[in-house]
Amino acid sequence: MKKKLGNNLGLKILSFVIAILVWLLVVNINNPIGTKSFVISDVQLLNEAYIDADGKMCMQDEQQVPIRVTIKAQRKILDRISVNDIRAVADLQQAVSLNTDPVMVPITVSCDRILQDNIEVSPQNLSLHLEDKDTQEFVVNVTTNNTKPDRGYEIGSLTSNPEKIKITGPTSLINKIDKVNASIDVDGATEDITTEKDVKIIDKNGEEFTDSDMSYLNVSRVYVTAKLWKVQADVKIKAGYSGSPKSGYQVESVSTTPNVVSVAGSEEALAALKEQNNTITIPDYVADISDRDSDFEEKINISDYLPDGLKLTSDSSEDMFIRVNVLPIGSSVCEVPTKNIVVNHAPDGMQVSFDTANIEVRVQKTDSSLDDLTEDQIKASIDLSDVKEGSHEVSVSIEIPDGYELVDDVTTGVEVSVISTAEGNS
């Protein structure tokens, strides 16, 4: 009886061992051991203070071979692993040597639920360059990236707080910095805007620093403010002159081109402008006509003469011309519409158009008792004999009543062109 029980016990043990082997076989068939590779783009540096104490910073070698991590595990585990589960670090205290270039730092990789022996990394070292650390100060330029406020508003000022910032990083990158910009979006805005922004760094080739470059820099954020000013249109320009013309001559008129402008300004500046009947006065000294016996014209930058708190609108030209008409005493200027000019001998099949709406006719009274001449008393004509198609500057014949004489010859620009027909245009 005992022998039978012993034989049964041996069979039971054998059956148990076979069951375990079968279970292991089934497990390996359904959930086999495999490998999976990942490319790691971010390796965390540890103990950077180790080199910071010597005034150094490290930058990754641009020739660094991509870091590939291979993990060995059961398939079900591998299927649940992503690159985000993998942590790669390089401890600067473990560097092979800090006196070589590049510096080689061992890479250590870890992953939850995976034994260290089942993780392989290639290459095994991170290649770094050590550089001197540098800190420089830069002014922050504020831009709107071509965005514009609502109609009737202009950008009064763009400011950054702080106005300048310190940037710390490797010397090679710091020396590449040309501009530090901060942008603010004012599209459709009708009131002042303040917002916190990251700065963008532009190198000396006009290229923006990459995210990789920025990762090596210590840069603070800034607060950017855009102040909006209201627009005032049809602001009149008043100009005078200084000095006296040559003996026997007089100032007939003073004019500006343009004679009105659009400005934007702060509330206080626009209120002060309104008190001046929305008129900007150019100082007399700008146009000095001392001892002149002919017309005088001066080109100025109108922005130089705007009161504080005012600026030209963005679509306005800063150029302005002050014209002082200087004539012999007793002379005057009449404007004659070009539509009143008689055209003689116009070429057949041609049409004539004038470059301007009016011409100036300067006359002087030989009899002081006469009234000033009017345009109705002036007869003007041009002769287009032998004139061909194109643009021409031609003399204008002027007939005026007795008692007056012409001060200057008169010319006008004309365009002679072929008359178009409906048939010719089809």
Image (cartoon, rainbow, N blue to C red):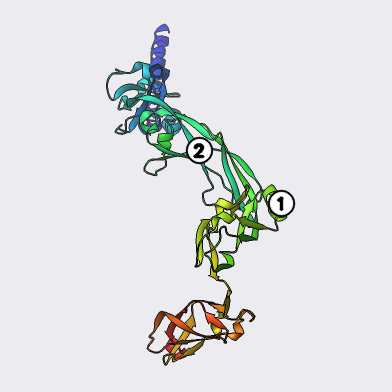
Give the mark toward the camera: 1 or 2: 1
How many other residues sit within 10 Å of disc 2, few (<14), some (14-19) or many (≥20)? many
Whole-percent x and y of residue 48? 41, 20
The residue most toward the left is 100
Marks 2 and 1: in contact by CB < 8 Å? no
With 406 as the anchor, is 79 left or right in this view? left
The residue most toward the top is 2
| Disc marking residue 271 | 1
Say which element carries label 1. Answer: helix
| Disc marking residue 140 | 2
Q: Is residue 70 visible?
A: no
Q: Is residue 162 above or below residue 304?
A: above
In the rendered view of the protein, which quadrant contains the C terminus?
bottom left
Whole-percent x and y of residue 126? 33, 26
Residue 127, quarter of picture:
top left
Q: Is residue 178 above or below residue 53?
A: below
Q: Is residue 159 visible?
A: yes
Q: Is residue 365 above or below residue 343?
A: above
**Residue in the picture at 65% in, 45% down:** 192
